[in-house]
Structure formats: C-alpha cells, structure tokens
Amino acid sequence: MSSRNTFADNPGRYAEARPLYPQALFDWIAVTCRGHDTAWDCATGNGQAAIALARIFRRVEATDISAAQVAQGFVAPNIRYSAGAAERPEFADHSFDLIAVAQALHWFDFDRFWPAVRQVARPGALFCGWGYAWFRGSEAVSELLFEPVTQLVSPYWAPNNRILWDGYADADVRWPFVRLEVPDLRITVRWSVDQIIAYVRTWSAFKNATAAGADTELEQILTHARHELGPEPRHELWVPLTILAGFVD
C-alpha cells in the first residue's frame, strides 16, 4: 500500500480532529532537557507539539514536509514554521537543545535521519519522539465503530505504521543512542460520537480505503454507529503513549 502523504489532505480538519498530547509529557521534557534555548519540532504537522514546546524553549523551529500542514500551524511569537524534509534540516550545526518528533518518527529514513540529528544537536541534547496507536473505550464504541472500521481499512495501512504499533523498537528505528527511562503516559479524551468519527476520518488507512472504493461501506458503518450511540453522552477514550528518548552523543 502506498505511503502517500494523506496528512496534507484538508490539514485544517486534521488539526481539529486530533487529540492533544498530555501536559505531563512536556513537563518531563522540560525537566529532562539540559538546555532550554532552542528546540526543533520535526514533522510538526499542525504544530500541536510546537505550541507546547514554545512555553519551554526560547525559540522553536517547526518543520514539516507538507507546506499545507505548516500553513495551518498554531501561532506563537517564538515559533518559526518552514517546509522541509526531516532528513535534510537546513539549520546550523549544533543548534538545538531538543529534537522532538510527534506521531511521525515511523515515516522517516532512519539511515539519513539520525546523522542529521547528530549534526544539528548540541552536545548532550535530548531527542524525544512519541506516538500513539489505538484508542480504547467502552464496549459499545469498540463494537459499533472502532472494530468494524479497523477491520475494513486494515489492508490500507502503510507498512510504516507497524513500527509505531510495535513500540518504536530499537531495531525497527535503528536507534543509535542509549534509551532513557520514560514516564508511563496516556492521552485521555471525552468525545462525542461525531468527534470520534472525525478522528477516524483522519486515519491514513481510512483515506486510502475511501479512495480505493470502500467509501459506501465505511459511511454505512459510521451512520449506524452515530444512530446507535446517539449525540450524547460523551465517551471517555484513552490511548497509551509510546515514547522514545535519549541524549544525543
């Protein structure tokens, strides 16, 4: 299955439908990072991580391969957005105290990315990458929505997603540093069925399945779930964060 950049499709809707990362993650980064001058938020997407990092670091450089995504980025006076590949950062050597990658590390060319990290990192800089996979919730939400959609779109996931699902294993990401012990964190949301559906529509496999002709069947599943679950109440969902961190040597 092609790994085309589906995240650039309607970036405004993508930004609205995705959950926020827990503040505890950024608190841990602030305490762990040895300097707080500059951070690189690589593959920033809509800038969700960048806006949180901007409260910790004097300056944040936020880059993404998609110019459409960075055009939708959250605004702060100390964030500068630019379009560019993760493997070819256009920054001076030894510029950053932190290199962060949120929900994107599994898409990179690791043989080129890690040398780029070493090139732009200050001595002892912190690398922190994180992501999440499958939300968990009530039995009703699982049976009516997540399970049938997941089953239908399963052939349309790009192989790279397996790297995240398997927890960013050292061998999968060609991890070159010593792993730090990281906190056990999760994202928790309280969403209406329409918010859950909006999130599901952002899945790359959902978009690929729709493009391949499964749109009618998918819409039938979503319509049935909306009818059965109703507009209220909001449903509590949670998903564990996979966090990969280490100091750049």
Image: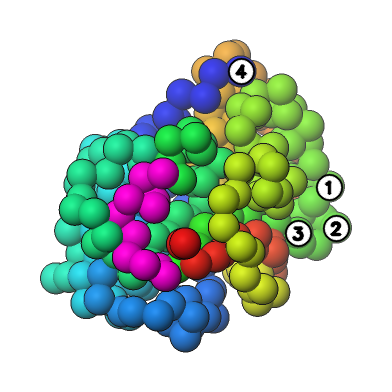
Mark 3 lies on residue: 136
Image marks 2 and 1: residues in contact by CB distance under 8 Å: yes
127 relative to 84, above or below: below
**Residue range (magenta):** 115-125
Quadrant (top left, top right, bottom left, bottom right) of the N terminus = top right
Under mark 1, the amino acid is Glu
The residue at 27%/60% (across/down) is: 94
Under mark 3, the amino acid is Arg
Cα distance in 3D space between marks 4 and 2: 30 Å
Q: Earlier in the sequence, mark 4 or mark 2?
A: 4
Tag shown at residue 1: 4
Mark 2 lies on residue: 139
The residue at 49%/80% (across/down) is: 32
Element type where label 4 sits in the image:
loop
Cα distance in 3D space between marks 3 and 2: 9 Å
107 relative to 12, above or below: above
